[in-house]
Image (cartoon, rainbow, N blue to C red):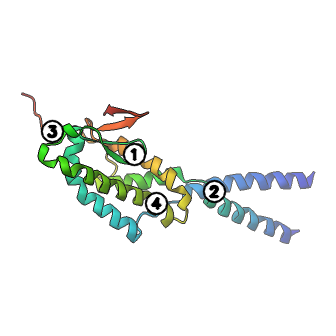
Amino acid sequence: MKKLIAVFSLLAATLLSSNWVSAAADLDVNTPAITAIKNSMQARHNQLSPHYNSGAVGLTADGLVAVRDATAVPLKDRGGINSLVAAENSDRNALYKEIAAGNGHPEWAGEIRSTFAGRWVDKAQSGWYYQNSGAWVKK
Amino acid sequence: MIKKIGIIGILVLLIPACVTINIYFPAAAAEKAADKIIDEVWQLKPGEEPPAKPAEAPAK
Protein backbone atom coordinates (compact mmCIF):
# COMPACT_ATOMS: atom_id res chain seq x y z
CA MET A 1 0.00 0.00 0.00
CA LYS A 2 2.75 2.38 1.01
CA LYS A 3 4.57 1.48 -2.18
CA LEU A 4 1.47 2.17 -4.23
CA ILE A 5 1.09 5.64 -2.74
CA ALA A 6 4.74 6.34 -3.44
CA VAL A 7 4.36 5.30 -7.07
CA PHE A 8 1.28 7.45 -7.52
CA SER A 9 2.80 10.50 -5.93
CA LEU A 10 5.86 9.99 -8.13
CA LEU A 11 3.62 9.95 -11.21
CA ALA A 12 1.71 13.02 -10.10
CA ALA A 13 4.88 14.93 -9.35
CA THR A 14 6.32 13.94 -12.73
CA LEU A 15 3.28 15.23 -14.55
CA LEU A 16 3.21 18.49 -12.62
CA SER A 17 6.86 19.25 -13.10
CA SER A 18 6.68 18.38 -16.83
CA ASN A 19 4.13 21.09 -17.31
CA TRP A 20 6.26 23.52 -15.43
CA VAL A 21 9.34 22.65 -17.48
CA SER A 22 7.65 22.94 -20.87
CA ALA A 23 6.06 26.24 -19.91
CA ALA A 24 9.46 27.60 -19.04
CA ALA A 25 11.08 26.55 -22.34
CA ASP A 26 11.76 29.35 -24.76
CA LEU A 27 13.17 29.35 -28.28
CA ASP A 28 16.34 31.23 -29.03
CA VAL A 29 15.97 33.37 -32.15
CA ASN A 30 19.11 35.44 -31.74
CA THR A 31 21.72 33.18 -33.27
CA PRO A 32 23.92 34.90 -35.90
CA ALA A 33 22.41 32.78 -38.68
CA ILE A 34 18.85 33.70 -37.76
CA THR A 35 19.69 37.38 -37.40
CA ALA A 36 21.31 37.42 -40.85
CA ILE A 37 18.25 35.82 -42.49
CA LYS A 38 15.93 38.18 -40.65
CA ASN A 39 17.85 41.24 -41.84
CA SER A 40 17.83 40.03 -45.40
CA MET A 41 14.06 39.47 -45.26
CA GLN A 42 13.51 42.85 -43.65
CA ALA A 43 15.45 44.56 -46.44
CA ARG A 44 13.43 42.69 -49.07
CA HIS A 45 10.11 43.58 -47.51
CA ASN A 46 10.08 47.06 -49.05
CA GLN A 47 10.14 45.46 -52.49
CA LEU A 48 7.58 42.80 -51.63
CA SER A 49 4.99 44.86 -49.82
CA PRO A 50 3.57 46.63 -52.92
CA HIS A 51 3.02 43.16 -54.39
CA TYR A 52 1.19 42.00 -51.26
CA ASN A 53 -0.96 45.12 -51.49
CA SER A 54 -1.79 44.60 -55.17
CA GLY A 55 -2.49 40.90 -54.70
CA ALA A 56 0.29 39.90 -57.06
CA VAL A 57 1.95 37.90 -54.29
CA GLY A 58 0.21 36.00 -51.53
CA LEU A 59 1.06 34.00 -48.42
CA THR A 60 0.96 30.23 -48.85
CA ALA A 61 -0.29 27.69 -46.34
CA ASP A 62 3.22 26.32 -45.87
CA GLY A 63 4.75 29.54 -44.62
CA LEU A 64 6.12 30.74 -47.96
CA VAL A 65 5.03 33.28 -50.57
CA ALA A 66 3.89 32.69 -54.14
CA VAL A 67 3.03 34.69 -57.24
CA ARG A 68 -0.74 34.79 -57.28
CA ASP A 69 -1.50 37.13 -60.14
CA ALA A 70 1.42 38.32 -62.25
CA THR A 71 -0.85 40.65 -64.21
CA ALA A 72 -1.17 42.78 -61.09
CA VAL A 73 2.53 43.60 -61.41
CA PRO A 74 3.50 46.61 -63.53
CA LEU A 75 5.02 45.34 -66.76
CA LYS A 76 8.45 46.73 -65.99
CA ASP A 77 8.65 44.77 -62.69
CA ARG A 78 7.21 41.54 -64.02
CA GLY A 79 10.57 39.97 -64.78
CA GLY A 80 11.84 40.51 -61.27
CA ILE A 81 8.89 39.14 -59.38
CA ASN A 82 9.82 35.48 -59.70
CA SER A 83 13.34 35.98 -58.47
CA LEU A 84 12.05 38.16 -55.62
CA VAL A 85 9.65 35.42 -54.55
CA ALA A 86 12.34 32.74 -54.93
CA ALA A 87 14.78 34.73 -52.79
CA GLU A 88 12.15 35.30 -50.12
CA ASN A 89 11.25 31.62 -50.05
CA SER A 90 14.84 30.49 -49.76
CA ASP A 91 15.25 32.83 -46.78
CA ARG A 92 12.04 31.58 -45.21
CA ASN A 93 13.01 27.92 -45.64
CA ALA A 94 16.42 28.67 -44.15
CA LEU A 95 14.81 30.59 -41.28
CA TYR A 96 12.60 27.69 -40.23
CA LYS A 97 15.51 25.29 -40.47
CA GLU A 98 17.83 27.57 -38.51
CA ILE A 99 15.37 28.15 -35.67
CA ALA A 100 14.94 24.39 -35.31
CA ALA A 101 18.65 23.64 -35.56
CA GLY A 102 19.66 26.61 -33.42
CA ASN A 103 17.55 25.21 -30.61
CA GLY A 104 19.00 21.73 -30.96
CA HIS A 105 15.96 20.17 -32.67
CA PRO A 106 16.27 20.03 -36.46
CA GLU A 107 13.16 17.82 -36.46
CA TRP A 108 11.06 20.77 -35.30
CA ALA A 109 11.47 22.62 -38.61
CA GLY A 110 8.12 21.43 -39.95
CA GLU A 111 6.21 22.49 -36.87
CA ILE A 112 8.01 25.82 -36.78
CA ARG A 113 7.04 26.32 -40.42
CA SER A 114 3.36 25.71 -39.70
CA THR A 115 3.48 27.99 -36.65
CA PHE A 116 4.92 30.71 -38.86
CA ALA A 117 2.39 30.05 -41.63
CA GLY A 118 -0.43 30.84 -39.22
CA ARG A 119 1.23 33.90 -37.73
CA TRP A 120 2.16 35.46 -41.10
CA VAL A 121 -1.51 35.33 -42.04
CA ASP A 122 -2.66 36.63 -38.64
CA LYS A 123 -0.34 39.59 -38.89
CA ALA A 124 -0.95 40.30 -42.59
CA GLN A 125 -2.67 43.55 -43.50
CA SER A 126 -6.23 43.39 -44.65
CA GLY A 127 -6.40 43.20 -48.41
CA TRP A 128 -3.46 40.81 -48.64
CA TYR A 129 -4.04 37.33 -50.04
CA TYR A 130 -3.36 34.04 -48.32
CA GLN A 131 -3.91 30.43 -49.24
CA ASN A 132 -6.57 28.47 -47.44
CA SER A 133 -7.08 24.80 -48.39
CA GLY A 134 -5.65 25.47 -51.83
CA ALA A 135 -7.69 28.59 -52.63
CA TRP A 136 -6.61 32.22 -52.43
CA VAL A 137 -8.51 34.25 -49.85
CA LYS A 138 -8.45 38.01 -49.51
CA LYS A 139 -7.94 39.03 -45.93
CA MET B 1 14.62 5.65 3.97
CA ILE B 2 15.49 9.34 3.88
CA LYS B 3 18.22 8.63 1.37
CA LYS B 4 15.71 6.76 -0.78
CA ILE B 5 13.30 9.69 -0.72
CA GLY B 6 16.14 11.98 -1.68
CA ILE B 7 17.03 9.86 -4.68
CA ILE B 8 13.40 9.68 -5.77
CA GLY B 9 13.15 13.45 -5.38
CA ILE B 10 16.12 14.03 -7.63
CA LEU B 11 14.75 11.63 -10.23
CA VAL B 12 11.38 13.36 -10.13
CA LEU B 13 13.07 16.65 -10.94
CA LEU B 14 15.52 15.38 -13.55
CA ILE B 15 13.59 12.83 -15.60
CA PRO B 16 10.76 15.08 -16.77
CA ALA B 17 13.23 17.87 -17.46
CA CYS B 18 15.04 15.72 -19.99
CA VAL B 19 11.98 14.02 -21.41
CA THR B 20 9.87 17.15 -21.82
CA ILE B 21 12.47 19.32 -23.43
CA ASN B 22 13.49 16.61 -25.87
CA ILE B 23 10.14 15.28 -26.99
CA TYR B 24 7.48 17.95 -27.00
CA PHE B 25 7.41 20.79 -29.47
CA PRO B 26 7.05 24.02 -27.47
CA ALA B 27 4.13 25.45 -29.42
CA ALA B 28 3.69 28.55 -27.26
CA ALA B 29 7.38 29.39 -27.41
CA ALA B 30 7.40 28.87 -31.17
CA GLU B 31 4.49 31.25 -31.56
CA LYS B 32 6.25 33.84 -29.46
CA ALA B 33 9.40 33.44 -31.55
CA ALA B 34 7.40 33.71 -34.79
CA ASP B 35 5.70 36.89 -33.60
CA LYS B 36 8.99 38.45 -32.68
CA ILE B 37 10.56 37.72 -36.05
CA ILE B 38 7.51 38.72 -38.08
CA ASP B 39 7.25 42.01 -36.18
CA GLU B 40 10.84 42.75 -37.12
CA VAL B 41 10.66 41.61 -40.75
CA TRP B 42 7.43 43.48 -41.42
CA GLN B 43 8.42 46.30 -39.06
CA LEU B 44 5.28 46.13 -36.98
CA LYS B 45 5.20 47.44 -33.47
CA PRO B 46 5.69 44.57 -31.01
CA GLY B 47 2.44 42.81 -30.28
CA GLU B 48 0.62 44.62 -33.05
CA GLU B 49 -2.00 42.46 -34.70
CA PRO B 50 -3.09 43.19 -38.25
CA PRO B 51 -2.53 46.90 -38.66
CA ALA B 52 -5.45 48.95 -39.82
CA LYS B 53 -5.86 49.12 -43.57
CA PRO B 54 -3.24 51.49 -44.93
CA ALA B 55 -4.63 54.99 -44.74
CA GLU B 56 -3.97 55.73 -48.39
CA ALA B 57 -7.56 56.23 -49.48
CA PRO B 58 -9.21 58.91 -47.34
CA ALA B 59 -12.95 59.38 -47.67
CA LYS B 60 -13.92 61.28 -50.78
Q: Nearer the viewer, mark 4 or mark 3?
A: 4
Name which residue type carries label 1. Answer: Arg
Q: How many marks?
A: 4
Name which residue type carries label 2. Answer: Ile
Same-chain status of marks 3 and 2 = yes
Residue at mark 1 to residue at mark 3: CA–CA distance: 23 Å
Q: Residue A1 appears at what percent x and percent y?
A: 93, 51
Left or right relative to A1: residue B53: left
Q: Nearer the viewer, mark 4 or mark 2?
A: 4
Give the residue at x 47% y 47%. Answer: A114
Left or right relative to B44: residue B26: right
Mark linked to residue A97: 4
State the residue position of label 1.
A119
State the residue position of label 2.
B23
Mark linked to residue B55: 3
Host chain of mark 4: A
Nearest the viewer among A8 and B48 is B48
Q: Nearer the viewer, mark 3 or mark 2?
A: 2
Disc 3 or 2, which lies upstream in sequence?
A: 2
Name which residue type carries label 4. Answer: Lys
Host chain of mark 3: B
Query: Quadrant where the C terminus of chain A lies?
Result: top left
Same-chain status of marks 1 and 2 = no
Query: Around disc 1, counting alpha carbons within 10 Å, would you say few (fewer than 14), some (14 to 19), or many (20 or more)?
Result: some
Name which residue type carries label 3. Answer: Ala
Q: Nearer the viewer, mark 4 or mark 1?
A: 4
Residue at the far left in the pictured view: B60
**Relative height, residue B8 to residue A79 (above, below):** below
Q: Nearer the viewer, mark 1 or mark 3?
A: 1
Q: Residue A32 appears at what percent x and percent y?
A: 38, 71
Where, by quadrant of the figure, is residue A22 drawn?
Answer: bottom right
Host chain of mark 2: B
